[in-house]
Image (cartoon, helix red, strand yellow):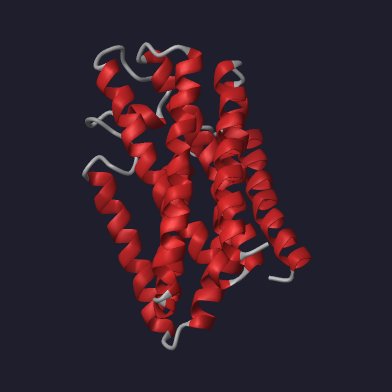
Amino acid sequence: MSVLSWIIVASLFGGVLSIAFAALFALNARMHWIGMLVSYAIGALLGAVFLDVLPEAIELADNASAVSGTVLAGILLFFTLEKVLIWRHCHHDHCEAHEPHEHSAHDHGRSGTMVIVGDTFHNFVDGIIIAAAFMVDINLGIVTALAIIAHEIPQEVGDFVILLHSGYSKLRAFQLNLISSLATLIGGVLAYYALQGLQSWTPYILALSAASMIYVAVADLIPGLHKRTQMRDTVQQVVLIGLGVATVGLVGFATGV
């Protein structure tokens, strides 16, 4: 397959797969699995960053310090985006999208709208990340897409819960999430054509991708794990994070990344 074909397939498959799994959890109330899935996603994200994406970016760049600086700038950028209520779909100080069990009953209609707008933006960025990775190497693209799918599922579960509490039917919530996931494909295709003539930008796009994954893992996902303080929970979290890292490592080994 061509690089563009890989981008299209990964974007579509990733979006549909994450929505399908999220629907399975959210619509069947198997919420106790989400904690395990979050731990695995953290490992997959960090494994992809430090085992594949960053090494590839540094190898492609003329200046490793510039890549590191881009990662730092990216982390600050995503912090700023989160503060202006874009990255996590938050409408006010209480972040409903990432606390599906505790959100209040007020402002549901606007919260549902914010979920769709925010998730569409997020998916568009994911498409750019996938495209940049595939344009460097097919195997790197596969690993990156795997990590993105892993972290999208728990986020999409939160989105489903907000939409359902906003008054949407189960079918309508599924349809809206599926339509929103198409932004990944749009971002991927646009990035493919934009980056073809800007190959020198690729290492820095990868560095921003790494920053995005690090920020999501460390700022969005890890704090939630600290709410479970039992030793059994801690051991389970560490094991599942390790499993996420190992999965990325094994995929990289099997595909020759």
Q: How many marks?
A: 0
Res 180 quadrant in image: top left
Residue 243 shows in the view? yes
Q: Nearer the viewer, residue 75 or 4?
A: 4
Q: Is residue 58 left or right of residue 78?
A: right
Q: Is residue 184 above or below residue 114?
A: below
Residue 36 versus residue 75 in the image, above or below: above
Judged from this view, the residue extending furthest toward the bottom is 62
Q: Quadrant of the C terminus?
A: bottom right
Identify the residue at image location x=40%, y=32%. Answer: 98
Question: Image check: 227 left or right of 251?
Answer: left
Quarter occupied by residue 96: top left
Q: Residue furthest right?
A: 254
Q: Can residue 47 be seen in this snapshot?
A: no
Of the 4 image quadrants, the one containing the N terminus is bottom right
Q: Which residue: 30% across, 26% down?
A: 113
Looking at the picture, how far across and down is residue 17, in whole percent? 61, 37
Does 203 appear above or below 90? below
The residue closer to the viewer here, 91 or 198, is: 198
Is 9 placed left or right of 178 in the picture?
right
| Residue 246 locus on image (x, y percent) | 71, 56
Query: Which percent across, then down, holds residue 247?
Result: 71, 54
Q: Residue at x 46, y 68 (%)?
A: 206
On screen, residue 223 above or below 140: above
The x, y position of residue 221, in whole percent, is 47, 42
